């Protein structure tokens, strides 16, 4: 689906199934196109999406079709916390725009890698194995998307926010899980 532009054939089948909601697990370009085309076909269900759609361009591309869409993610600049204040200020000064979720995740990934390198250095040397071992030992590395700790599976533990599109902007959804 990445890069596709016409979803009408699929959406016609979806419309016939009369779903209660549609979950789009894609990036903002395809998510906006799917929402617009679904609305054009008369599909009036709730749309849900992933952090891949958590980008201001979603509203520019999707217009009214993405209004009330619910999206999960680990960061949005509208959510101010003590951990985000310095990051938001520095990012806006450097780039003259608010950071995206991808910028925040990239920042946290870099900070987490730095913490792993520091730990590996203390334990003897920076090798691939030493870095992998260090990631397993890291606990609550501070970050703008929340503290970083890895589960034994290698997945990052953390919290998600649910946001909704209201009047062309992301805002915290009324209900958080």
Image (spheres, rainbow, N blue to C red):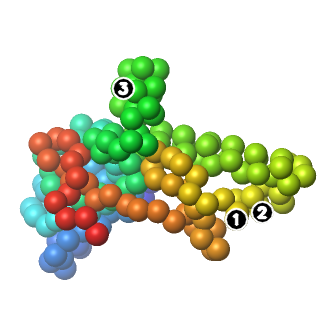
Between residue 75 and residue 142, name the one nearer to us: 142
Say if residue 9 shows up in the picture.
no
Task: Answer few, some or many: residues within 10 Å of disc 3's Cα (few below 14, many 20 plus, some between 14 and 19).
Answer: few
Q: Which mark identifies residue 55?
A: none
Q: In the rendered image, which quarter is residue 74 located in?
A: bottom left
Q: Are marks 2 and 3 in contact (CB under 8 Å)?
A: no
18, above or below 119, in the image: below
Q: CA distance from mark 2 to mark 1?
A: 5 Å
Q: Which mark identifies residue 133?
A: 2
Q: Secondary structure at mark 2?
A: helix
Q: Secondary structure at mark 1?
A: helix
Task: Answer few, some or many: residues within 10 Å of disc 1's Cα (few below 14, many 20 plus, some between 14 and 19).
Answer: some
157, above or below 144, in the image: below
28, above or below 132, in the image: above
* Residue beneath disc 3: 97
User: Which quadrant does the C terminus fall into?
Assistant: bottom left
Q: Earlier in the sequence, mark 3 or mark 1?
A: 3
Q: CA distance from mark 2 to mark 3?
A: 37 Å
Identity of the residue drawn at 60% across and 65% down: 150
Locate residue 56 relative to residue 115 in the image: left or right: left
**Percent x, y of residue 48:** 26, 63
User: Which quadrant does the N terminus fall into?
Assistant: bottom left
Q: Are marks 2 and 1 in contact (CB under 8 Å)?
A: yes
**Percent x, y of residue 32:** 27, 49
Locate residue 162 relative to residue 42 in the image: left or right: right
Q: Secondary structure at mark 3?
A: loop
Q: Name the mark nearer the viewer: 2 or 3.
A: 2
Identity of the residue drawn at 83% across and 47% down: 121
**Percent x, y of residue 153:** 63, 74
* Residue beneath disc 1: 136
């Amino acid at each position: 689906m990445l890069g596709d532009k016409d979803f009408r054939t699929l959406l016609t089948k979806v419309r016939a199934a009369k779903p209660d909601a549609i979950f789009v697990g894609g990036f903002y370009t395809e998510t906006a196109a799917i929402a617009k085309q679904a609305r054009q076909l008369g599909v009036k269900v709730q749309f849900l999406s992933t952090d891949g759609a958590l980008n201001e361009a979603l509203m520019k591309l999707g217009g009214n079709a993405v209004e009330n869409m619910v999206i999960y993610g680990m960061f949005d600049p509208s959510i101010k916390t003590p951990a985000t204040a310095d990051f938001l200020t520095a990012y806006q000064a450097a780039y003259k725009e608010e950071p995206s979720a991808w910028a925040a995740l990239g920042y946290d990934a870099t900070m987490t890698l730095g913490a792993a390198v520091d730990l590996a250095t203390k334990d003897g040397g920076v090798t691939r194995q030493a870095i992998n071992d260090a990631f397993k030992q890291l606990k609550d590395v501070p970050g703008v998307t929340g503290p970083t700790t890895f589960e034994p599976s290698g997945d990052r533990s953390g919290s998600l926010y649910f946001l909704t599109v209201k009047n062309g902007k992301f805002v915290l959804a009324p209900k958080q899980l």
